[in-house]
Amino acid sequence: MLDMLTWLPENVSTFGEGIDEAFAFIYWVSVGIFFLINIIYITFIIKYRRRKRSERAYYTHGNNLLEFAWTALPFVLFAGIGIYSDQIWRDIKYAELQPNPDVTVEVMGQQYMWHFRYAGSDGVFGHREMKFISSTNPFGIDPSDPNGKDDVTLINQMNVPINKHIQVKLSSMDVIHSYFLPNMRIKQDAVPGTWVDVWFNVDKTGTYEIACAELCGDGHYLMRAELNAQSQEEYDTWINQQYEMKLASLADPNADTAEGTQQDTTQTASNDVAGGE
Ligand SMILES: [Cu+2]
């Protein structure tokens, strides 16, 4: 019952082990201190109880050695945890230490869905600006930039190849959301008006949950997407299909648009995930 660590979802991230070790270390230190404090507490209640009705309370002005000890010990403990976890944290969070990306995906949070954007077949993201953001243009892609025309956008579905450095550029178009990938050991706030870089590297194919971890309104619980981690071949096939659908929709704007089709399949897929739990 004590071992809540088994509640953690499967780790499929290359840096997840470090996070889990730090988590376990802090968890067991807390469990140890919890029992230590309660044992001392109960012992003292019994040992120093009033035995006779006539017994008077006795006051002390403290003990310098004791006070020094219970100030110094937590200081050493917290400073130690800080130094230890920074070794893990820096590789994940420090922008200048992030590895060169193999794939870059832009992620935009919106009440209550996630938008994903891939550079088009030209490999270049079209210029974007906050002022162009609208319900039909969640990333604010500049309509006058030809590079943006073929960019692929998806709702609630993100595909990535395994064993590759995935760079996520994260933002929000309304309120603060939090991009949470439990299996990747990633949780990062998405803040309107600013872009934050996040990276991960999945080492196992599969479908994983993407959730919003910041209470963002009454539909917060609906804000889920899925991450499909694929082999490089599968991913290449998938992204090429996306390029083709996008180019087809550009050539014939009246045809059933690629985006519409993607939305439909995504909807079915997320229902399956939700129903399976
Ligand atoms: Cu949200």
Image (cartoon, rainbow, N blue to C red):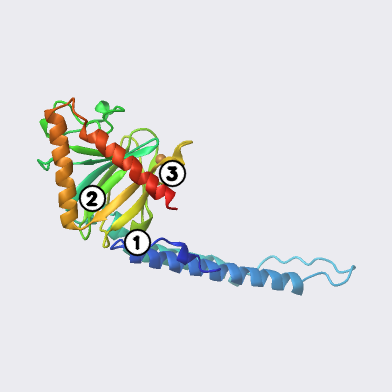
| 28 is higher (above) or lower (below) than 260 | below
Q: Is residue 82 found left or right of 123 in the rendered image?
A: right
**Mark 3 or mark 2, which has the lower sequence index?**
2
Task: Report if residue 250 is visible in the image.
Answer: yes
Q: Hey, what amino acid is under mark 3?
A: Glu
Residue 201 placement: quadrant: bottom left
Some atom of ligand 1 lies within 8 Å of the CB belonging to the residue at label 3: yes
Q: Nearer the viewer, mark 1 or mark 2?
A: 2
Q: Residue at x 34, y 42 (%)?
A: 268
Residue at mark 3 to residue at mark 1: CA–CA distance: 24 Å
Spot occupied by residue 151 in the image (x, y as percentages of width and height):
17, 37
The mark found on residue 194 in the picture is: none
| Residue topped by disc 3 | 214
Some atom of ligand 1 lies within 8 Å of the CB belonging to the residue at label 2: no
Q: Nearer the viewer, residue 190 or 262?
A: 262
Q: Residue at x 66, y 67 (%)?
A: 62
| Residue topped by disc 1 | 86
Q: Is residue 122 found left or right of 118 in the rendered image?
A: left
Q: Residue at x 75, y 74 (%)?
A: 47
Q: Residue at x 12, y 34 (%)?
A: 147
| Residue topped by disc 2 | 167
Mark 3 is surrounded, within 10 Å at the Cα level, by few (under 14), some (14 to 19) or many (20 or more) other residues, namely some
Residue at mark 1 to residue at mark 2: CA–CA distance: 21 Å
Q: Hey, what amino acid is under mark 1?
A: Asp
Image quarter (top left, top right, bottom left or bottom right) of the N terminus: bottom right
| 112 is higher (above) or lower (below) than 28 | above
**Mark 3 or mark 1, which has the lower sequence index?**
1
Could you tell me which secondary element the residue under label 1 belongs to? helix
Residue at mark 3 to residue at mark 2: CA–CA distance: 21 Å
| Ligand 1 quadrant in view | top left
**Mark 1 or mark 2, which has the lower sequence index?**
1
Q: Nearer the viewer, mark 3 or mark 1?
A: 3
